[in-house]
Image: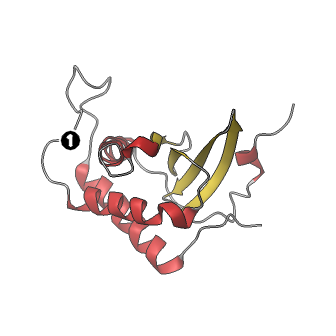
Amino acid sequence: MERIASFTINHLELMPGLYVSRRDRKDGCVITTFDVRITAPNREPVIDMPALHTIEHLGATYLRNSDKKSDIVYFGPMGCRTGFYLVIFGDSDSKDVLQLVLNMCEFIISYQGEIPGAHPAECGNFSEQNLNMAQYYIRRYRNELIENHRFTYPE
């Protein structure tokens, strides 16, 4: 069986960044998947579940209300809990979505109040949220992204 593309990336060298994970084409439509890598795999602790869940709720809320909302297909956590996938319509590069991701980070960092969708009728695990830790991870990620400009997977 053929290995999927994400398993060919050397996760021992992968650092936080914003990477094009894949581009899929069908019937003239292009969908780009971005790896929003928040922590360094296998070298840092993974994102704890309540923070991960809060980042998902706030990130998805921001993206689906942004001026790019018609381009957003999906935003959700990686199974390894080191980041998120951002899936958008169009053939884009990391630098094309950088400002959108930075704006999402600012939204999460400055967010106060009830977490959107954190009610029993709206979410299957509504009570597992941690805004303070979500803001910690996203602040760290934003600073890392601005300082180090990691947009290409390691060779």
Determine if residue 42 is in view.
Answer: no
Residue where numbered disc 1 is placed: 115
Q: Is residue 99 left or right of residue 120?
A: right
Question: From the viewer's perspective, is residue 83 above or below residue 25?
Answer: below
Q: Is residue 141 left or right of residue 65?
A: right
Kindly give the residue lying farthest to the top in the view shown: 121
Q: Is residue 122 left or right of residue 51?
A: left
Q: How many marks?
A: 1
Kindly give the residue lying farthest to the left in the view shown: 113
Specify the quadrant of the image occupied by residue 24.
Answer: top right
Q: Position of residue 117 (x, y in %)?
A: 24, 33
Q: Position of residue 82 (x, y in %)?
A: 52, 51
Determine if residue 148 is in view.
Answer: yes
Badge 1 density bin: few <14, some 14–19, many ≥20, Cα 10 Å: some
Q: Position of residue 81 (x, y in %)?
A: 50, 46
Kind of residue at badge 1: Ile
Q: How is the image coloured?
A: secondary structure
Assign a secondary structure to mark 1. Answer: loop
Residue at image point 43% right, 65% down:
141
Specify the quadrant of the image occupied by residue 57.
Answer: top left
Residue at image point 68% right, 63% down:
153
Question: From the viewer's perspective, is residue 5 above or below residue 109?
Answer: above
**On the rendered image, what quadrant is the C terminus found in?**
bottom right
Residue at image point 22% right, 38% down:
116
**On the rendered image, what quadrant is the N terminus found in?**
top right
Q: Position of residue 87 (x, y in %)?
A: 53, 44
Kindly give the residue lying farthest to the right in the view shown: 1
Kindly give the residue lying farthest to the bottom in the view shown: 147
